[in-house]
Image: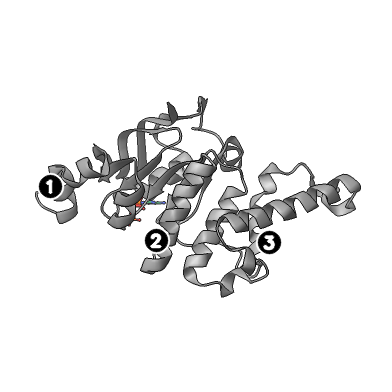
Amino acid sequence: MELLKAQDITMEFGGLVALEQLNFSVERGRIFSLIGPNGAGKTTFFNVITGFYPPSNGSIQFDGVELVGVKPEQITSFGIARTFQNIRLFANMTALENVMVGQHCRMNAGVWGALSRNKKTMIEEKHVHRRAYDLLKQVNLHKQEDVLAKNLPYGEQRRLEIARALGTEPKLLLLDEPSAGMNPHETLELIKLIGRLNRELEITILLIEHDMRVVMNISDKVIVLDYGKKIAEGTPEEVQSNERVIEAYLGKKRNR
Ligand SMILES: Nc1ncnc2c1ncn2[C@@H]1O[C@H](COP(=O)(O)OP(=O)(O)OP(=O)(O)O)[C@@H](O)[C@H]1O
């Protein structure tokens, strides 16, 4: 069954059409990869799903709810979380604090509760603290709970971003180039982590990825964009041998 369904999504920036009448579905419980050459529109699509860019046309249904026109914070509370191509952590906060911030949208205490530090707020804070630690455990970073984000190695910063995203309790996790800058060992750990989140926490995953080893290893389905259009969709094997995909990557017969 579809968890996310985008219909006829067009995104224009001035005269540039970054996405053109894109139809795109992600089935619940699966791992989908979104690939395509540089500038194909992959990150733009993430920005449209998460409400950062209102599309010029089209609709996106998530778990039966329309997302177009909804603010990013509300989309997060519906159950969509993301990580970014360029890591966006709070550099001077510890690993644990970064994850605690991620849980903000699921907390009940408002500003007054936090300031007055009443009993209810204190209990909630304790809960948030414990859950943040559990999430660090999920990504195998619990031993680094007190390390400032900026002092973590690159691969660990990427895993911390994932833990922070998990704090929002997503049904759908969008990962933008999660393996970028990772060494082979870190990449292998990432592949295992993504598989575990999908299997054990039943999180549906859509990832943008350039590393074909990652894509081929973990994807149930691969969707290929080129110049804002979907040019192929299928299993990793099907997509790998698709003529249009090979042309797009090798730059043959390009007419734009
Ligand atoms: N805010 C913006 N204003 C103007 N043009 C934009 C904006 N964001 C993206 N674009 C353009 O839209 C097109 C698609 O960009 P996008 O970043 O989505 O591609 P991508 O497939 O994610 O590329 P990469 O793999 O290099 O990250 C590009 O031509 C880009 O320059």
**Image point (58%, 63%), residue name:** 141
Q: Which residue is denoted by mark 2 in the rendering?
A: 188
What's the distance in space between the residues labelled 3 and 1, CA to CA?
49 Å
- Judge by depth and name the residue closer to the eye, 114 or 256: 114
* Residue at the extreme bottom of the image, as rendered: 151
The residue type indicated by label 3 comes to Glu
**Image point (15%, 49%), residue name:** 246
Disc 2, SS: helix
The residue type indicated by label 1 comes to Asn
Q: Which residue is denoted by mark 1 in the rendering?
A: 255
The residue type indicated by label 2 comes to Leu
What's the distance in space between the residues labelled 2 and 1, CA to CA?
38 Å
**Image point (63%, 52%), residue name:** 102
Q: Which residue is denoted by mark 3 in the rendering?
A: 97
Residue 132 visible in the snapshot = yes
Residue 204 vs residue 71: left or right?
left
Q: Are marks 2 and 1 in contact (CB under 8 Å)?
A: no
Q: Quadrant of residue 100?
A: bottom right
Residue 69 vs residue 227: left or right?
right
